[in-house]
Amino acid sequence: MVRRCIVFAHTQATYPTLHTSSQRVLVTGGAGFIGSAVVRRLIRASDSQVLNVDKLTYAGNLSSVAEVETDSRYRFECADIGNRARMTRLFAEFQPDAVMHLAAESHVDRSIDGPAAFVETNIVGTYCLLETARDYWRELPDSDRAGFRFHHVSTDEVYGSLGETGRFSESSSYRPNSPYAASKAASDHLARSWRRTYGLPVIVSNCSNNYGPYQFPEKLVPLMILNAVDGLSLPIYGTGDNVRDWLFVEDHAEALTTIVNSGVPGETYNVGGNSELTNLQVVQRICELLDDMLSESPHRPHASLIEYVDDRPGHDKRYAIDAGKVRRELGWCPRETFDSGLRKTVAWYLTHRDWCKDVQRAVYQRQRLGLGKAAS
Ligand code: NAD
């Protein structure tokens, strides 16, 4: 995919730039979907030392970072970001130049069934990590303190739901609607205030829906691919007309390393794929690709497996991101179109059935989540 992206002069000249090419980066949630893409990218495309801190919940899997596990610049620690004593020790030992904070409970449907874990990790855990980082940062020598970065990774869901028109910008109001979005909104506010109140060099990014390899099969794209391959029903919430802006995960990982390298502390950057599609359109494209790639499948046409089910409670209608700022100021734009990224994604799931079986283990059988019937 050829990238056409015009880089404009930008405004961070007065801030020391972090060069992750030769720095020590502590990544939280690096065994998850996006975090593992960031870890793989940092090891593959820079000289960074990487400490991956992950609690290994149902969503975290070390097989997602298997390709870097023997690299001498990579280290893994199984730890909870909410364990302040443990995190303090890890900061003291590793001496990070930057923190990229991706650890989170991330699935909206699970937040409806059990919001407590979302409050615990996304809000309290982020608070603990900010405090650990602040204690560490204020003891750094002046020269290192100015270059330190705390990059808080967040979602466009904090902005709530759009109507037929318009896109979210960095100045859009926060109107989170699900427990997940509310917990991420709270953590964004904490991160922002740690910059404003204590001077911690925090950068926040808010991204649209990601898809790609290594995504846990509870999320729309992998769930639909795996169910279709097995000839199972493809459950579409409501009428399937909810719109999301889709971004390939490797593009997001590149945006994140660009932002932590060149972003301005105190700023927010919206990241998106400029690829608005309804959920139904996404599923139809997956079905078309599978019809093409699995020409012998007894389940063709795969779209015949589509089934409309009860909508998600409080389902946001439309998200769309204006990613003009990160493009103009930092020169990032996606390399993949939705079609090229989706083709790679479907091909990956077809050739990684063992990974899919392994990560689901006993914890998830692709059952319906998010009707709010489970106890929290
Ligand atoms: P994920 O669920 O795939 O991975 C989350 C990781 O965090 C897992 O490896 C899990 O083990 C780890 N984790 C959870 N609680 C932890 C704790 N208390 N301590 C340490 N580790 C813990 O999530 P993802 O989709 O990779 O999302 C990563 C981040 O990006 C999240 O902050 C999410 O809000 C944000 N985000 C996701 C998307 C998306 O489409 N997936 C879009 C925008 C932003």
Image: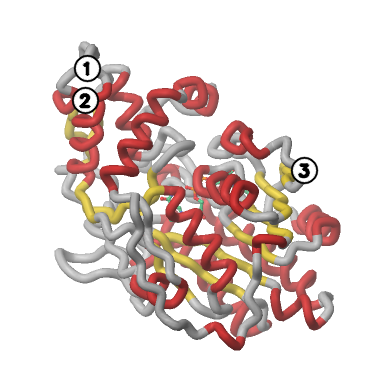
Q: Earlier in the sequence, mark 3 or mark 1?
A: 3
Residue plotted at (61% across, 79% down): 195
Mark 2 and 1 residues: CB-CB less than 8 Å, in contact? yes
- Where 78 falls versus 235 (above or below)? below
Number of on-image labels:
3
Query: Secondary structure beneath disc 2?
Result: helix
Q: Is residue 70 left or right of residue 246?
A: right
Q: Determine the image quadrant of residue 263.
A: bottom right
Query: Which residue sits at x=57%, y=85%?
Result: 13
Query: Callout 2 environment at 10 Å: few (<14), some (14 to 19), or many (20+)?
Result: few
| Residue 91 to residue 281: above or below | below
Which is more toward the observer, 67 or 108?
67
Cα distance, mark 3 to mark 1?
Answer: 43 Å
| Residue type, mark 1 in image | Ser
User: Looking at the image, can residue 190 be seen?
Assistant: no
**CB under 8 Å between callouts 3 and 1?**
no
Checking the image for residue 295, the label placed there is: 1
Foreground pick, 177 / 79? 79
**Apparent side of residue 254 relative to residue 125 in the rendered image (left or right):** left
Pointer 3: residues within 10 angstroms few (<14), some, or many (20+)?
few
User: Closer to the camera, 266 or 146?
Assistant: 146
| Badge number at residue 32 | none
Dot 3 or dot 2: first in sequence order is: 3
* Residue 207: percent from left, percent from top: 41, 60
Front residue (pair 319, 14) = 14
What secondary structure is found at the residue carrying circle 3? Answer: loop
Number of the label disc, if any, that sits on residue 72: 3
* Residue topped by disc 2: 292
Against 52, residue 172 (above or below) is below
